[in-house]
Amino acid sequence: MTDSSRKKTALILIWISAVVMIIHFIILDYDTADFWDLLGPLSNVLLIIAMYTVVRDVNKKAKE
């Protein structure tokens, strides 16, 4: 993967996780199906992966 494609992937993951968090915490009630309860932790995992990708790229640039 090139740097630009990694950044695009990270940004896409950040946006997906943000949208999922908004849906999970604002729009939906907490009484809904168990599937929606899994989306909160899933969005957090996606956000962590995206942040790791961005930090890794920044560290690579700093070493160069």
Image: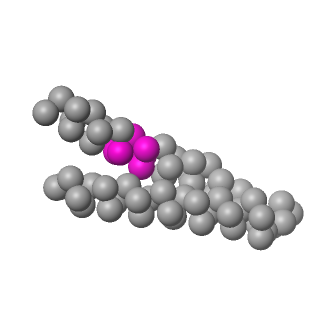
Question: Does residue 40 lie above or below 28 as drawn?
Answer: above
Q: Is residue 34 visible?
A: no
Residue 17, picture quadrant: bottom right
Q: Which residues are magenta?
A: 49-54
The reply, left or right, for residue 57 in relation to residue 21 is left
Quadrant of the image for the N terminus?
bottom left
- Residue ID at (48%, 57%): 14
Q: Is residue 3 magenta?
A: no
The reply, left or right, for residue 18 in relation to residue 58 is right
Residue 27 place in picture, x, y as percent: 77, 70
- Residue ID at (43%, 44%): 51
Residue 37 place in picture, x, y as percent: 71, 57
Residue 56, picture quadrant: top left
- Residue ID at (48%, 43%): 48
Question: Does residue 50 lie above or below 52 as drawn?
Answer: below
The one nearer the camera, 38 or 56, is: 56
Q: Residue furthest top?
A: 63
Residue 20 place in picture, x, y as percent: 61, 63
The one nearer the camera, 54 or 39, is: 54
Residue 55 place in picture, x, y as percent: 36, 38
Q: Residue furthest left?
A: 64
Question: Does residue 43 lie above or below 22 as drawn?
Answer: above
